[in-house]
Image (cartoon, grey):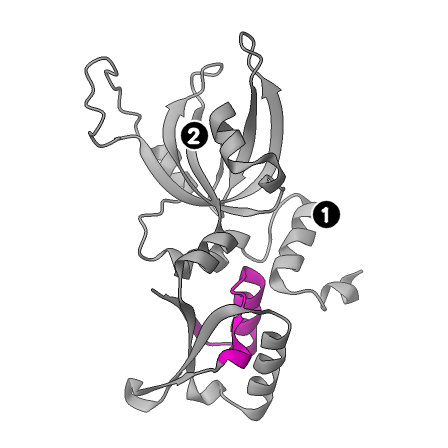
Amino acid sequence: ILLNCLTLDKLELLAYEKEVLGLYINGHPTDIYKPFMKYKKVYSIDSIIERDIIKIDFNNRDRNAARPNRVTFLAALTQVIFKHTKVKHEKFAICTLEDATNHIKGYLWNTMLLEIGESKLNEGSIFLIEGDLQQNLAFSEEKVIFVNKMELVDDLIKSAYKGVVFSVSENHITDETIKQFYYLISQHKGDCVIHLEIVGEGESKRTIVLNEKYHISPTASFIDSAVEIFKVCKVYPIE
């Protein structure tokens, strides 16, 4: 079994760790996406739990006012339970959401659940989530998220960015690493352009824009594998 694990990419290895051990050892799947969130105010789950919940007078509240309990964060979906409300018998979901720092429950009420679609709520999927921090109605000490927006990060990256920049030290550009990189590209064909930024001495830079033959689908698996090939590699999106 250990020998077989050596052939897995980072995401597969993390998934295997979670399945067998119940926790991640070599990082967390959400870490791979952080370069794509640098222009967004994204909180860690641990920092969200530490926040104080601000009480709001909804009767006198301006609809256009800022929402003080609104947070945005990256999380892996580790569990989903479907239930029905007692009065209207409307279906909703309780999701366990996790990042490298902690976990929290997220409530998807019926309207939100229909908008997202049950088919997307697969365990292990990574989401960018926006919601309001609230006290659990059943357990007053527990803080939860009432989700009002939930997007698969892979879908978000494909739709929001024109391309991906891989910034690599020229010391890590060799015939072998380029060969491995092109092979990796061949396994992840898509519509996203790649810029290879080569950093030389004194932080001098030159950029190679790969042609359409080398456009890719910028999934976390591709990004993490590219980082493994070049060892020292920064990744950021082209807006």
For marks 2 and 1, give the one nearer the viewer. 2
Q: CA distance from mark 2 to mark 1?
A: 28 Å
* Magenta span of residues: 212-234
Picture layout, residue 223 above or below residue 54: below
**Mark 2, residue position:** 145
SS for tag 1?
Answer: helix
Image position of 159 (left or right of 27)? left
Q: Is residue 35 found inside the magenta-colored segment of the image?
A: no
- Which mark is first along the chain, 1 or 2? 1
**Mark 1, residue position:** 20
Image position of 50 (left or right of 101)? left
SS for tag 2?
Answer: strand
Q: What kind of secondary structure does the magenta stretch mostly adopt?
A: helix
Of residues 110 and 229, the one nearer the viewer is 110
- Say what amino acid the circle numbered 1 marks: Val
Taking the spot 54% from the left edge, 10% from the top edge, the residue there is 88
Taking the spot 62% from the left edge, 39% from the top edge, the residue there is 119
Picture layout, residue 7 above or below residue 209: above
Q: From this viewpoint, which residue is outermost toward the right?
A: 1
Residues packed near mark 2 inside 10 Å, few (<14), some (14 to 19) or many (20 plus):
many
Taking the spot 34% from the left edge, 57% from the top edge, the residue there is 38
Q: Image quarter for residue 118?
A: top right
Taking the spot 72% from the left edge, 47% from the top edge, the residue there is 20
Of residues 42 and 211, the one nearer the viewer is 211
- Say what amino acid the circle numbered 2 marks: Ile
